[in-house]
Image (cartoon, helix red, strand yellow):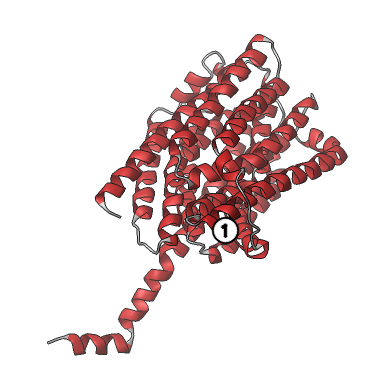
Amino acid sequence: MGETHRLTFFRQAGWMTMATSLGGAFMYSVHVPAAKMPPAEYGVFLALLQVMNLLLIPAIGLQTIMAQQTAAAVTPAHQRQLAYTVRRLLVAGGLLWLILVAATAVGHPVLIRRLQIVNPASLWLTLGIGLAMLWWPVFQGVLQGQQNFLWLGVLQIVNGLGRLICVLALVWWLGWHAAGAMLAALLGFAVTLGSAAWLTRSVWSGPGEKVAWKSWAARVIPLTLGAGASQFMVAADQILVQDTFSREVTSLYGAAGTIGRALVLFTAAVFAVMFPKVVASRARGESTDVLAVAFGGSAILGAIATTACMLLPALPLKVIYASQPVYWTVAPLIPWFAWCMLPLSLANVLIAHLLARERFRAVPWLILVAAGYGVTLWARQDTLRQMEQFPAFLSVVRTLGGFSLLLLSVAAWFTWGGRWTTKVLCRNSPGADGERSRRTP
């Protein structure tokens, strides 16, 4: 990659980092009025936010493959196939959402009990957001594949700002609780989704051409599973805490988790810029060192944020929960959350690169790590109930950190380990010595 391309990458990554940070700032500002709810309702709201993240998993691979397919659509035939694919995915997402509605109608008493929900409208509004979560990755992937980072960043800001305005109106002013906050999230998402559909209309409204769905599915399934492994690890701990502890204290863990998960979003902008560039370079048969730039940039940003959390752990809590000093008591968890989320942030960069290069051999191992994390969390549920509050919370965070480091190790091995082993074997082979001796004058 030439010097001009590097400057372009840093400019685009800088804009996406700024837009993600601004959108994230609006998103996290939502917690200022939301924290006015009773702690039990606020804990439900935090748990439902992570349920939203889990609802994204069936479609999370769609953003990846749509970015990949859009970036590689360099011929009219590929562009017609892209239009056909987008339309069919929107229909499939709607059908999947109807299945989720039916399943929720059958099992909602269990969900309400396990998540300790008082107002069932909160659950149904979260399910309504599920439709937007299934459609949003399709449009987001198209924008990402087009490298239309200007509007991709603007929509992140719009989503955060829209949610904040609606929460101020529904929760702060009207006094609604978790249901009002989830309605605000739905309204903000609706504006963002409608804008994305309008911006990409030239792609999905054009003439279509059928695609080979069998080969397409062979790509999207590992993409979904690989990206979903990381998404599961981001969300699972808060849902476990909501199911394990009293409604009155789960919001304390959620307050610390809100700061910790911000680190993942803070570094997400870098690999969002990296992915379509890797796909485009692969489609053209070009080499690129964008991984080194993206991984190094994420590591630097993550280290700065983590160091800030170590030096000033109570500061973000005092900013967000200025009028609720009870949340300041979880400040000792903030450095732990930051250090445990940092490996997960770096793993996301490597996973995105592996998926962009279609190195799907890593996917089963990534799933194994995520599955092991989930089994470990729920197997320790009874033990956690018997522990005091802070040690129990710290145990959950440490479990997250251990499996995040394991996920990073697996992603690093499939990114660099195989090539390093091949070089060592080639260097130590008899033929290699003979070849060197023949080349030596």
Residue reaching furthest right? Answer: 106
Q: Is residue 261 above or below residue 83?
A: above
The quadrant holding residue 394 is top right
Q: Is residue 35 positioned above or below 385 on the image?
A: above
Going by the image, does 12 lie left or right of 255?
A: left
Residue 387 shows up from this direction:
no
Q: Is residue 19 left or right of residue 99?
A: left
Q: Which residue is mark 1?
A: 366
Quarter of the rendering containing residue 94: top right
Where is residue 186 drawn, in percent x and y? 67, 28
Could you tell me the amino acid type at mark 1? Answer: Leu
Q: Quadrant of the N terminus?
A: bottom left
Residue 175 relative to residue 258: left or right: right
Which residue is at 38% across, 40% downward? 13
Disc 1: CA contacts within 10 A as few (<14), some (14-19) or many (>=20) = many
Label 1 secondary element: helix
Q: Position of residue 389 (x, y in %)?
A: 63, 33
